[in-house]
Image: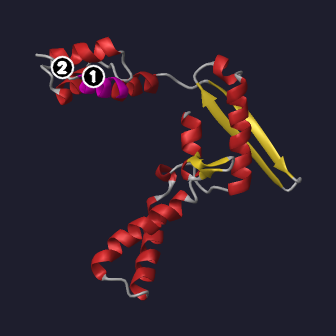
Amino acid sequence: MAVKIEDVKRLKDLTGVGLTDAKAALEAAGGDFDKALEEMRKKGMTKAEKRGEREARAGVIGSYLHDNRIGVLVEVNCETDFVARNENFTNLVKDVAMHIAAAAPEYVSVEDIPAADQEKVRAEFVEKAKAEGKPAEMIEKIVDGMVKKHFAERCLMDQPFVKNPDQTVGDVVKD
């Protein structure tokens, strides 16, 4: 059975394997994308699994001091010392430290927010929406948006990057 090039590309992008491996997996699965993906996971061929096994042992500790009033120390880890010595990486660490000093995030990511804090904020927004007389059927959607925005402003990885507000800190770190 012939496999679709779109499926090959999508499987390659999802797993991080080469085109030939993605095509071979799809051919072995008879063109079934989900089956090919499952087989690749069983064989341990996905990029996330490969990276998850490796430990980020190298890294850089960056600092930023603003007017002798606000100080930030940030540690950013990577897999190799080659990357840690790279000028782009060290500049990234400095930029992240500067961003933290300017934006004062409370959490690194949404996953770091305690459930109790999330529920407390959600309850406050539900009460606020009810007090404003919002329709009952719309309150859940309104509150979801308010909670998402509230925590995006407080989570480092979701904040707009100080040097380029079109990107989040998470996007900059991934690049």
Colouring method of the image: secondary structure
Q: Are marks 1 and 2 in contact (CB under 8 Å)?
A: yes
Name the residue rendered at 76%, 47% in the picture.
Answer: 72
Secondary structure of the residue carrying numbered label 1: helix
Q: Nearer the viewer, residue 95 or 5?
A: 5
Q: Is residue 78 above or below residue 27?
A: below
Amino acid type, callout 2: Val
Q: Quadrant of residue 64?
A: top right
First in sequence: mark 1 or mark 2? 2
Name the residue rendered at 15%, 26% in the picture.
Answer: 32
- Can you give x and y, in whole percent of width and height, for residue 13 in the image? 36, 27
Q: Is 84 on the left or on the right of 50, as rendered?
A: right
- Residue 8 numbered tag: 1
Q: Residues within 10 Å of mark 1 (few under 14, many from 20)?
A: many
- Can you give x and y, in whole percent of width and height, for residue 100 in the image? 69, 50
The magenta-colored residue range is 5-13
Residue 151 is a magenta residue: no
> How many numbered marks have been drawn onto this rendered protein structure?
2
Q: Nearer the viewer, residue 9 or 70?
A: 9
Secondary structure of the residue carrying numbered label 2: loop
- Residue 3 numbered tag: 2
Q: Can you say which quadrant of the picture contains the N terminus? A: top left
- Give the Cα distance between marks 1 and 2: 7 Å
